[in-house]
Amino acid sequence: MGVNRITHITQKTDFDAVMDTGVQASTPHFALHVKTPTAVNRIGAVVPKRWAKRAVTRNTIRRQIYALAAHRTWPLPASDRVIRLRKAFDTQVFGSATSLALKAAVRLELQTLFDKAQHTS
C-alpha cells in the first residue's frame, strides 16, 4: 500500500542531503536520488540552466516532474526524492519549449525512471 500525499522539497540543505545518497535510478536525461526514511513523502526537481537554457523549458520540465509525482502512489516508507536533469533535450527535435512532443517525451522518461526506482528498492 502506498501514500499519495507528496510535498515539495524547498531548502538547499534538504536537496543536498538527498543528492548525497547517490543515484538510485537513471534514464538518458534524468537521475533519481532517494533518501529514506522520512516523515512524509517529498519531491524536488533540479533542472540546471546548463542543460535547459531557456527558463520556459526549465519550468516546463519542472512542472512535468511535479505533476507526474503528484499522481503516483508512493511506496512506504516515506522518502525524499530529487529528480535531476543531467542531459539536455535536443533542441533540433523539440523546437518549442512548451511543445506537446517535449512534454510527452519528458513524461515518458520520468515514468520509466519511477518504474526503475520501484524495482530497485
Image: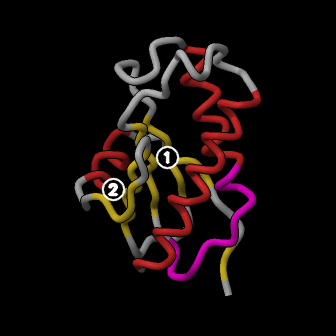
- What residue lies at 73% left-to-right and 23% top-to-bottom? 99
Q: How many marks?
A: 2
Q: Give whichever of 58, 95 is nearer the camera.
A: 95
**How far from the left and from the top, in percent, is residue 14?**
36, 49
- What residue lies at 61% left-to-right and 21% top-to-bottom? 94
Magenta-span inclusion, residue 75: yes
Looking at the picture, which amino acid does disc 2 mark? Val
For marks 2 and 1 on the same chain, the one whose residue lies earlier in the sequence: 2
Callouts 2 and 1 close, C-beta under 8 Å: yes
Q: Residue furthest bottom?
A: 1
**How far from the left and from the top, in percent, is residue 46?**
43, 37
Q: Residue furthest front?
A: 93
Q: Is residue 112 above or below residue 29?
A: below
Q: In what element is the residue under mark 1?
A: strand
Per the rendered image, the range of residues in magenta is: 68-78
Whether residue 50 sits left or right of residue 61 in the image: it is: left
Q: Is residue 9 above or below residue 113?
A: above
Whether residue 87 sits left or right of residue 77 in the image: it is: left
Image quadrant of residue 42?
Answer: bottom right
Looking at the picture, which amino acid does disc 1 mark? Gly
Q: Which residue is mark 2?
A: 18
**How far from the left and from the top, in percent, is residue 12?**
35, 39
Q: Residues within 10 Å of mark 1 (few under 14, many from 20)?
A: many
Q: Which residue is mark 1?
A: 44
